[in-house]
Every structure is written in C-alpha cells, then in structure tokens.
Image (spheres, rainbow, N blue to C red):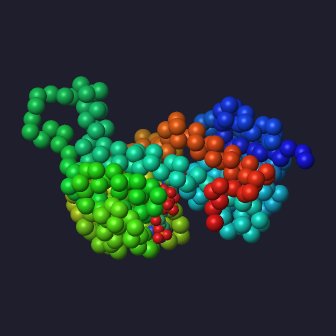
Amino acid sequence: MKKPTIYITRKLPEHLLQPYTDRFDFQMWEKEETPVPRDVLLAEAKKAQGLVCMLSDKIDQEFLAQNPQLKVISNLAVGFDNIDIKVAHEKGIVVTNTPDVLSETTADLTFALLMATARRLVEANEEIKANRWGDWSPYYMAGTDIHHKKIGIVGMGRIGEAVARRAKGFNMSILYHNRRRKERAEQELGARYADFETLITEADFIVSLVPLSEETKALFDKNAFGKMKKSAIFINASRGAVVDEAALYEALKEGEIEAAGLDVFLHEPIDSAHPLSTLKNVVCLPHIGSASRETRTTMIQLCLDNIDGVFYGDGPKTAVK
Ligand SMILES: NC(=O)C1=CN([C@@H]2O[C@H](COP(=O)(O)OP(=O)(O)OC[C@H]3O[C@@H](n4cnc5c(N)ncnc54)[C@H](OP(=O)(O)O)[C@@H]3O)[C@@H](O)[C@H]2O)C=CC1
Ligand SMILES: O=CC(=O)O
C-alpha cells in the first residue's frame, strides 16, 4: 500500500514525526508560529488522506466539501469548535482530539490565573519594572484571599474536576454547574451542584471551563455579570466566545465585578489595543492553558497515534463522537 499523505498545518518537531515516517508521507506547513494561509491549506489538504490541524484552522463546510477524500482529521486540542463535526461525520471523516493528556496542565494554568488575578501578581510585577515600589503602606497592592472562598466551576468536566482538586487544597468550597449532575465528583471533591444562576450569584470565583457550543455562546453576558457579586472574580480558560466581551468590559470598568483572568478571547490573537487588555483589573494570557513542553509533546504524539490507529490499527484512541 502506498504510504498515506498526512498534511500538518504547523511546523512540528521532526523527531516526533520520525517514528511514523515508515508508514506516512508527512507534508507540513513550514512555520511554527504562523498559521497556514487558507489557500495553502485548501490546496495542500486535497493531496492528503489525513490532516493534523490546530485551533486556528477553520475546518468548516467549505473545507470539508473540497476534501471528502480525508479519512481522518486530528485536532491538536481537546476543544473542537473549529471543526464542523456534523459535516465531517456525514462525509465519513473521523475526527480526533486530545482529551485527558492536557487536563492537569490546563488546570495548573487556570488556577495560576485565578491566583494571579486575585493577588494582582501582574500589576505588582509591573510596579517594580516601572520603579514605582515606594514605602510600605497597609493596602499597597492588596488583593483578595483565595483560601476558604467559594469557587464556582461552569463546565465540571475533565479540566473542571482537576481545577476543583486544586481548589480543595486551598480549603475552598466548590460549586459546579453542568447540564447533568456528577455525583461521583460531588462525593470525591465535596462539590455542590448548582443551577447557573445560583452559581454565578453565590461564587467568589467563577471559572469557565465549558466547551463552546450553540448553547454556551455568550453564556456570560450582561445579565450574568450583573448577577455576580461586586467582589467576584471571573476566570475564563475555555473559549472567548462563551463571553460577551463588551459586557465583560463594562462590568469590569463600572465595578460590577472586581477582576477577570482571561486565557482566551473571541478573536485571537489580541494585542494591547484590545479593550480588556487596557484594564488594570484584568490579567490577559495568550491562550496558553496546555502550553507546557511535556504536555504539548504528549498532545502531538496522541494526534499522530490517532492517525496511525485509523490507517493501521483498531481505530483512533480518542475520537470525537
Ligand atoms: N485555555 C486552554 O488552553 C484550554 C482550553 N480548553 C477548553 O476547555 C474545555 C473543556 O475541556 P474538558 O474539561 O476536557 O471537556 P469535558 O468535555 O471533559 O468537560 C466539559 C464539561 O462542560 C459541561 N457542559 C457542556 N456543555 C454544557 C452546557 N451547555 N452547560 C453547562 N455545562 C456544559 C459538560 O457536562 P454536561 O455534558 O453534563 O453538561 C462537561 O462536564 C474545552 O472544550 C476547551 O474549550 C481545553 C484545554 C486547554
Ligand atoms: O484550547 C485548547 C484546547 O486544547 O482546546
């Protein structure tokens, strides 16, 4: 059998591809930090039987209509809102993602973002860089406590539970909201199920780890921010589009909530002109939830194993259903 061609939309380390080169002909976009242009993606994918893609690649109806020959699309992410799953499945294309292997790393980052926002770490660091650290004063750079507070996790899935485990270590009380209750997690973590409104009203820290879908688009809107405590801190580590960014900006500017920590944005990348990044009470990160060297390597290996499973094994390890 002729080796299947796999197109990879970002430059990946050759040594990670090497174990598979006897079975696949890899073609790859040559840049690590710049996404493949749409026209190149469309042209290259047509020559391939498999695709490794990233969050920034829109695998939409147009792409899928032009590439019915693809057997597998392997997304280097657990979230798959960049892919039209329904259309891919109608065309018989297997879609895979990278669940579990990034949960602990993303939970580390989410909790770090929560802590950095509550204790104003970025602002405090900027004080020193700008030579503004003066005499001691009682409330200089005072933030808010984390321990013994109430965290509300919207999207208590793999990553949500990993965040809850960290919160437990800080003696926080834990509320969560999903469409379905998770009694096992309630017992293991001492978490309490709440409807969305109760969670956003009662929690000191509201953490979004819910996947982007039609149901969750702009879930955190003006109405939601209006119901939060004035002292609430909002953390988003899922997708920018679950938030109405204009409403969040207003809530932060008008003091309806205290602060926000954001790893994700509606249109990425953002820059210093983005309204949310101009606010002192916001910590912005460039979508680095799973960005540890170890986890990114494991994710890449899982993407390749999934493709290998489709062509030569019993199927992929982690298919999107
Ligand atoms: N910042 C970053 O770099 C990263 C971001 N992510 C984001 O985190 C998300 C979560 O990942 P992961 O934990 O692995 O996913 P999971 O599928 O394990 O968890 C998602 C949870 O959200 C709940 N949920 C889904 N839809 C709704 C809804 N409409 N209302 C309320 N709850 C809902 C689900 O429960 P139920 O079905 O019962 O509702 C489930 O418990 C990803 O989809 C991705 O967007 C992931 C990795 C890194
Ligand atoms: O945002 C990252 C992901 O894995 O999803």
Asked if 133 appears above or below 8 in the picture, the reply is above
Tell me which residue sits at (41%, 45%) in the image: 109
Q: Position of residue 87 (x, y in %)?
A: 71, 67
Q: Position of residue 73 (x, y in %)?
A: 71, 54
Tell me which residue sits at (69%, 45%) in the image: 304
Using residue 316 as the reference point, say whether residue 253 is left or right of it: left
In front here: 88 or 182?
Answer: 182
* Quadrant position of residue 79: bottom right
Asked if 40 appears above or below 130 in the picture, the reply is below
Using residue 255 as the reference point, say whether residue 282 is left or right of it: right
Asked if 273 appears above or below 315 in the picture, the reply is above
Q: Position of residue 113 (x, y in %)?
A: 35, 46
Tell me which residue sits at (58%, 60%) in the image: 81
* Quadrant position of residue 69: bottom right
Tell me which residue sits at (22%, 57%) in the image: 149
**Screen quadrant of the C terminus:** bottom right
From where the camera sits, is residue 27 visible?
no
So how many labels did they put on this image? 0
Using residue 120 as the reference point, say whether residue 269 is left or right of it: right
* Quadrant position of residue 128: top left
Q: Position of residue 218 (x, y in %)?
A: 45, 65
In front here: 21 or 228?
Answer: 21
From where the camera sits, is residue 47 visible?
yes
Q: Residue furthest right?
A: 1
